[in-house]
Image: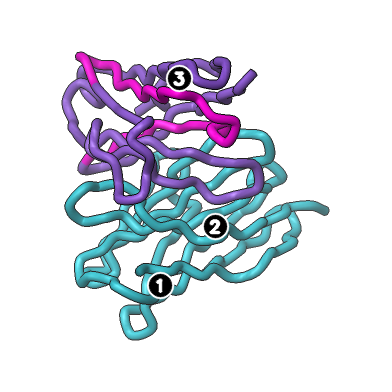
Chain colours: A cyan, B purple
Amino acid sequence: QVQLVQSGAEVKKPGSSVKVSCKASGGILSSYTISWVRQAPGQGLEWMGRIIPVLSIANYALKFQGRVTITADKSTSTAYMELSSLRSEDTAVYYCAHMDQYTYAFDYWGQGTLVTVSS
Amino acid sequence: QSALTQPASVSGSPGQSITISCTGTSSDVGDYKYVSWYQQHPGKAPKLMIYEVSYRPSGVSNRFSGSKSGNTASLTISGLQADDEAHYYCCLYTRSSTLFGGGTKLTVL
């Protein structure tokens, strides 16, 4: 059973950066993919990008290219999402999600990390 | 790529059936089979309900079913129960991206 545990809530100033972690455990296959999905207050889900940790290959949604960096540490099965040049509109819950390599569906989700951007 | 289009809200009475649509284009929903659906209760992480258009993960009630016709995928919930009240999101995986629908609020009357 896969478990994804994310780092805790963050409060950041506009213009700064935030880095959120997601540690995977249990039943991880070698070619799994981790995506980052965010949800602003009262809004829907928004895909930001994904990484294949074993290959360290990442790709990003056009909206976030240049501002988001997704990395992974294979040795600790931990993925990271760093978002820079933060603005108030980035206030959201950020989720990591494990994508099954056969069904291409998000079968496991982290608990979510609230990032608040406020001066 | 734009988000997939879902109705903002649907409602139904206990025991009834409802269908939520998810409309894309011939370049996304019409061209890929990796449509999935997620249920999200307030304050909780999304939960996978349907994958690859019409398959249910283990543990998901057979009251939930999925289909696709052309550029539109659909989620049908039969025998509505109070606990089905939640937001539902469709999702499409493509080689270069992943798209979500805007979400549909299901109210059980």
| Chain hosting mark 3 | B
Spatial distance from mark 1 to mark 3, Cα to Cα? 32 Å
Where the N terminus of chain A falls, by quadrant?
A: bottom left
Q: Is residue B99 visible?
A: no
Mark 3 closeness class: few <14, some 14–19, many ≥20 residues within 10 Å = many
Spatial distance from mark 1 to mark 2, Cα to Cα? 20 Å
Q: Residue B107, position in %: x, y?
A: 61, 22
Is A74 displayed left or right of A46 in the figure?
left
Is A119 displayed left or right of A2 in the figure?
right
Is B99 displayed left or right of A43 in the figure?
left
Q: Which residues are magenta?
A: B68-94
Depth check: give the residue in front, A63 or A94.
Answer: A94
Residue beneath label 1, please?
A: A24
Depth check: give the residue in front, A69 or B27.
Answer: B27
Q: How many marks?
A: 3
Tell me the residue at 21%/22% (across/down).
Answer: B27
Q: Residue B104, position in %: x, y?
A: 52, 24
Secondary structure at badge 3 equals loop
Q: Is residue A91 above or below residue A80?
A: above
Residue type at numbered disc 2: Leu
Residue beneath label 3, please?
A: B6
